[in-house]
Image (cartoon, helix red, strand yellow):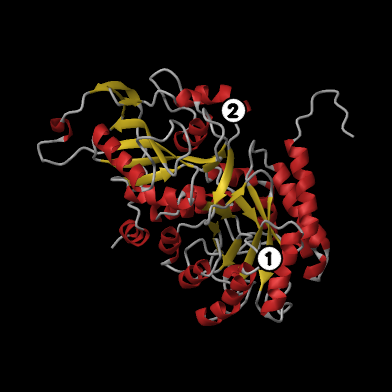
C-alpha cells in the first residue's frame, strides 16, 4: 500500500496528489448523462473549487464531516478564517475556507450530494432564513474540465458562483487556494476582485480547535513550555509532581500564554529516548490535571503517534512533532484521523545524531524545501493546510551559522511553504550562549527574545502568522505585544507617536 492509500484509509478522507493544470477560456455546459462517458466507459474527472462555512455547533466537526462525506477526493485546502456575518449580521461569526477537490460527478449530481450533506449535518434547507445561521454551508465556486474553467447556467446552479466578487469571506480563501492570477471569468483575475475588498475585510486567520474553540492569529501567539522530564536542557526535573506541573501551566496562562506545550521526552542533543509507556505516564496525568481547571489549548510535544492519540483523547488539542511526522510512520495518518492541528518541524537524524548532520549546501533553501515537502506529504495524508504550522527547527541539526541564517531569512521559508504559520523555538538554546557568552540556559532569556523579535521583524510578510515557543512567558508576551503594535501601526507622514 502506498503512502496516499495508507493515509486515506487511516484518516477517512480521500486524498489525491495535487497537480498543476492550465487555465483556459470558459465553456458553456449542458448537463447530460452521456457527457461524462468515454469509449472505455471511464468517467471524466473534474476539478471543483468549493466554499465551506459554518457558524453553529461544533464548527470543526461539521467541517471535517462535510469533507469526509463529499463524493470527491480532496486535493488541497485554503487556510481557515473567522469572518463577520454578511447580509444577516445578527448571528455568530463564521469559519470560512475553500477546498479543491476532484470528482467524477456532473455539476447537478454534485450539487445534489452537497445538499444532502448539508441536511445530514443539520442545516434546515426549507424554512430557515436565507443567509442565516447554519451548521454547514457548501457552495460550488468553479468547475474545471481538464484545462477549461466551465460556465454552467441552469435554473438552480450557476458556475462560476455569481456572488464571488462581493464576498471577502470567499475571496480570501480563494486567494490562498488558487492564487491572484486565477482567471475568474476569462478576463478578470482573482487578485483584481480581491484588491477592492481587502482593506475592509474582517477575515482573520484561525487555528481551529475542538469544542468550538479557535486560536485567532490577531497577534503573535506565545506558547509556554512545560517539560515534565528529568533531563531537559534548561528545566529538566524542575517540576517534581503533577500538582507542580499543573500549577506551572496555570501560572503561564495567567502570564499570557495562549498555548501550553507539554513534553514527556527530552529532545536535546544527545538525549536518550524513553519508552512510550514512560512518556505517557509523564504527560497524561498533567493534561488531565490542567483540564480540571482550564480550557487553554494544550499541545503535546511527541514523536510517537500513540502518545499523540492518547494525549488528544485526554484533552490536548495540538500535536507538536519535532520530526515533522517522519519518526513514526503512523503519525501523519493519526493526526489526520484525529482532525487536530500539527506543528511540523525540520530536523535531521535523531537527538543522538543530529549535531553530526549540520552541513548544508544552502541551509535556508534546504530547510525551506524540506518543510514544503513535509507539508505536502501531510496534506496528502489528510492534515489540512488550515491545520498546519511549520518550524525551521532552530538548534536541531544546525550549527551557529545555520541558526542565524534561518532566523535572518524567515521570509524565504514563509514564501516557500505557502505562508503557513511559522513557529520559532529559540528559547535558551545553545547558539544564544555562543553569541552572548552566557553559559547557564536559564540566563539566556533576553537573547532568546531578541532572536525571535529580530527574525519576525526582518520578515516583511503583510499578514504574518507567528507562534513563539518559550520558557519565559511574561517577558516574551510583553515583547511580542510591543512588536505587534509597531508592525500593525499605520503611521502617516508627520504623525507624532506618544
Instruction: Give the residue pinned by disc 1.
Output: 225
Task: Report if the CB atoms under discs 2 and 1 are less than 8 Å apart.
Answer: no
Q: Is residue 419 above or below residue 175?
A: below
- Report the residue at 85% width, 26% height from top: 495
**The C terminus is located in which quarter?**
top right
Horizontal and vertical percent position of residue 282: 60, 78
Horizontal and vertical percent position of residue 126: 35, 35
The quarter of the displayed image where residue 103 is located: top left
- Report the residue at 67% width, 56% height from top: 258
Horizontal and vertical percent position of residue 93: 56, 40
Q: Is residue 426 above or below residue 197?
A: below
Residue 428 can be seen, yes or no: no
Image mark for residue 325: none
Image mark for residue 198: 2
Name the secondary structure under disc 1: strand
Crowd class of label 1 (few under 14; some 14 to 19; many from 20; radius 10 Å): many
- Report the residue at 56% width, 78% height from top: 279
Disc 2 to disc 1, C-alpha distance: 36 Å
Residue that sits furthest to the left in the current view: 39
Q: Is residue 151 left or right of residue 347?
A: left
Q: Nearer the viewer, residue 119 or 208?
A: 119
Q: Is residue 319 left or right of residue 457?
A: left
Horizontal and vertical percent position of residue 340: 49, 57
Amino acid at each position: 500500500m502506498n503512502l496516499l492509500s495508507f493515509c486515506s484509509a487511516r484518516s477517512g478522507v480521500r486524498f489525491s496528489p495535487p497537480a498543476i493544470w492550465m487555465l483556459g477560456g470558459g465553456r458553456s455546459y449542458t448537463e447530460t448523462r452521456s457527457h461524462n462517458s468515454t469509449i472505455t466507459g471511464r468517467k471524466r474527472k473534474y476539478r471543483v473549487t468549493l466554499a465551506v462555512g459554518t457558524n453553529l455547533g461544533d464548527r470543526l466537526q461539521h467541517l471535517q464531516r462535510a469533507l469526509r462525506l463529499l463524493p470527491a477526493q480532496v486535493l488541497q485546502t485554503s487556510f481557515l478564517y473567522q469572518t463577520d456575518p454578511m447580509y444577516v449580521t445578527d448571528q455568530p461569526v463564521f469559519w470560512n475556507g475553500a477546498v479543491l477537490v476532484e470528482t467524477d460527478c456532473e455539476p447537478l449530481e454534485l450539487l445534489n450530494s452537497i445538499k444532502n450533506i448539508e441536511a445530514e449535518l443539520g442545516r434546515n434547507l426549507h424554512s430557515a432564513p436565507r443567509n442565516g445561521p447554519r451548521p454547514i454551508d457548501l457552495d460550488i465556486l468553479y468547475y474545471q474540465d481538464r484545462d477549461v474553467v466551465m460556465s454552467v447556467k441552469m435554473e438552480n446552479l450557476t458556475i462560476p458562483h455569481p456572488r464571488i466578487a462581493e464576498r471577502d469571506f470567499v475571496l480570501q480563501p480563494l486567494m490562498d487556494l488558487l492564487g491572484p492570477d486565477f482567471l475568474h471569468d476569462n478576463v478578470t483575475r482573482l487578485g483584481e476582485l480581491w484588491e477592492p475588498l481587502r482593506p475592509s475585510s474582517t477575515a482573520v486567520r484561525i487555528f481551529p480547535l475542538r469544542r468550538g474553540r479557535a486560536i485567532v492569529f490577531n497577534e503573535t501567539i506565545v506558547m509556554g513550555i512545560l517539560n515534565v522530564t528529568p533531563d531537559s536542557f534548561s528545566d529538566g526535573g524542575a517540576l517534581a509532581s503533577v500538582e507542580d506541573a499543573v500549577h506551572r501551566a496555570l501560572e503561564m496562562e495567567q502570564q499570557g500564554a495562549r498555548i501550553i506545550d507539554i513534553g514527556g521526552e527530552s529532545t536535546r542533543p544527545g538525549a536518550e529516548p524513553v519508552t512510550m509507556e514512560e512518556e505517557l505516564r509523564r504527560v497524561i496525568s498533567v493534561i488531565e490535571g490542567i483540564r480540571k481547571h482550564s480550557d487553554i489549548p494544550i499541545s503535546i510535544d511527541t514523536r510517537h503517534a500513540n502518545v499523540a492519540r492518547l494525549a488528544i483523547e485526554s484533552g490536548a488539542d495540538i500535536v507538536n512533532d519535532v520530526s515533522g511526522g517522519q519518526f513514526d510512520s503512523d503519525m501523519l495518518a493519526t493526526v489526520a484521523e484525529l482532525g487536530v492541528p500539527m506543528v511540523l518541524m525540520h530536523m535531521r537524524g535523531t537527538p543522538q545524531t543530529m549535531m553530526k548532520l549540520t552541513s548544508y549546501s544552502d541551509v535556508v533553501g534546504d530547510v525551506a524545501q524540506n518543510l514544503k515537502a513535509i507539508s505536502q506529504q501531510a496534506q496528502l495524508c489528510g492534515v489540512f493546510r488550515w491545520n498546519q504550522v511549520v518550524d525551521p527547527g532552530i538548534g536541531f541539526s544546525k550549527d551557529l551559522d545555520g541558526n542565524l541564517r534561518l532566523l535572518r531569512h524567515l521570509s524565504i521559508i514563509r514564501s516557500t511553504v505557502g505562508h503557513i504559520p511559522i513557529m520559532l523555538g529559540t528559547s535558551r538554546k545553545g547558539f544564544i550562549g555562543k553569541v552572548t557568552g552566557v553559559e547557564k540556559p536559564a540566563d539566556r532569556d533576553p537573547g532568546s527574545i531578541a532572536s525571535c523579535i529580530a527574525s519576525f521583524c526582518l520578515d516583511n510578510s503583510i499578514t504574518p502568522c507567528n507562534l513563539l515557543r518559550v520558557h519565559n512567558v511574561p517577558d516574551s508576551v510583553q515583547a511580542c505585544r510591543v512588536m505587534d503594535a509597531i508592525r500593525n501601526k499605520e503611521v502617516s507622514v508627520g504623525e507624532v507617536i506618544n
